[in-house]
Image (cartoon, rainbow, N blue to C red):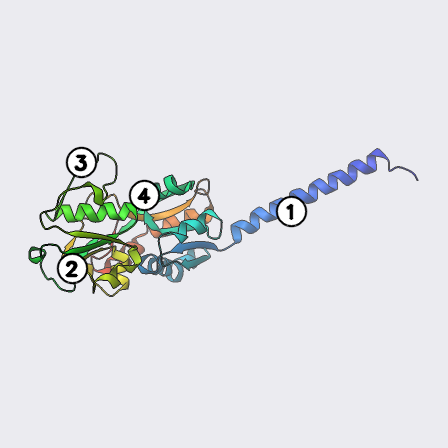
């Protein structure tokens, strides 16, 4: 058997390399042409994304696919495992807590909106009427629990110890003149807890989803000004330059989206840009 000449081998190798290079180029191009999959809470995040999808994305050349999640855990799991390309449901403090506990390597982009946390009740119409020993339900994740405790403190229902930069927990309640019984419940379940507790501190998106109006039904709301808990788009670190991400970021911070938020949510959701 005759061995192929070196020139023939070289030609075959070059052709193979060219083919691999071309395939790699096609893969890169096809990746850019894939729909951008964004995980979001149903309200208001998915609604805002749907407005972008229906009114703005086509003109921008963006193919947007919305994947809805009803909890605060799975959107980061899905982003980490590559099931989605970005998520839109969380705040920077929550993201930082998740990165510390789960080891995620994500990047937060620019703030889009704020959902003020509110105190709600089915039995009370004024915080001054809270009975001694009242039960208060708050979110059970560290970030939103801290927000809830600070909101209770801001309304003179309890006093927290100085925890410095650390997020306060129920163990940091220093003074509790009403002997409030604090119960931690998964955030999405808080609206359902209203029939079983005297007060519940509920995230804005879950309040709206339960047909509660933060502006009308809340006994107290977080202040929006200077609030660090704006919701934003989160991506895997290194994906910030993805052209599709850049397009979506531009659309989420457009005057059209600002107007949509203001018109749709009547103060229950506020633009943060």
For marks 2 and 4, give the one nearer the viewer: 2
Q: What kind of element bears circle 1?
A: helix
Spatial CA distance of label 4 from label 3 is 21 Å
Can residue 116 be seen in this snapshot? no
Q: Earlier in the sequence, mark 4 or mark 3?
A: 4
The residue that label 2 is drawn on is 198
Sequence-first disc among 2 and 4: 4
Residue 154: x %, y % from top left? 13, 46
Q: Residue at x 45, y 51 (%)?
A: 78
Residue bearing the label numbered 3: 162
The foreground one among 74 and 252 is 74
Dots 3 and 1: beta carbons under 8 Å? no
Q: Which of the two marks, 2 or 1, is nearer to us in this view?
A: 2
Q: Is residue 19 found left or right of 63 in the rendered image?
A: right
x, y percent for residue 246: 42, 46
Q: In terms of sequence position, does the residue under pointer 3 or pointer 1 come before the other? A: 1
Q: CA distance from mark 3 to mark 2?
A: 27 Å
Which quarter of the figure has residue 96?
A: top left
Mark 2 or mark 1, earlier in chain = 1
Specify few, some or many for label 1: CA neighbours under 10 Å numbering under 14, 14-19, or 20 or more.
few
Q: Of marks 3 and 2, which one's residue comes earlier in the chain?
A: 3
- Residue 23, disc: 1
């Amino acid at each position: 058997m005759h061995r192929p000449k070196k020139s023939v081998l070289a030609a075959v190798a070059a052709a193979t390399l060219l083919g691999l290079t071309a395939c790699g180029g096609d893969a890169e191009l096809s990746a850019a042409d894939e729909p951008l999959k964004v995980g979001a809470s149903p309200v208001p995040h998915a609604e805002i994304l749907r407005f972008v999808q229906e009114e703005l994305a086509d003109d921008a050349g963006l193919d947007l696919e919305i994947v809805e999640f009803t909890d605060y855990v799975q959107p980061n799991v899905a982003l980490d495992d590559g099931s989605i390309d970005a998520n839109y449901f969380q705040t920077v403090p929550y993201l930082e807590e998740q990165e510390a506990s789960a080891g995620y390597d994500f990047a937060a982009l620019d703030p889009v909106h704020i959902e003020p946390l509110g105190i709600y009740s089915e039995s009370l119409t004024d915080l001054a009427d809270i009975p001694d020993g009242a039960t208060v339900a708050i979110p059970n994740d560290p970030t939103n629990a801290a927000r809830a405790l600070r909101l209770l403190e801001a309304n003179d229902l309890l006093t927290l110890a100085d925890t410095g930069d650390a997020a306060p927990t129920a163990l940091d309640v220093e003074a509790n003149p009403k002997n409030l019984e604090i119960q931690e419940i998964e955030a999405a379940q808080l609206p359902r807890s209203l029939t079983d507790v005297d007060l519940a501190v509920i995230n804005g998106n879950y309040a709206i989803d339960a047909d509660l109006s933060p502006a009308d039904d809340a006994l107290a709301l977080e202040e929006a000004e200077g609030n660090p808990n704006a919701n934003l788009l989160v991506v895997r670190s290194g994906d910030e330059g993805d052209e599709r991400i850049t397009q979506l970021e531009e659309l989420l911070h457009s005057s059209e989206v600002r107007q949509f938020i203001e018109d749709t949510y009547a103060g229950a959701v506020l633009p943060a840009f």
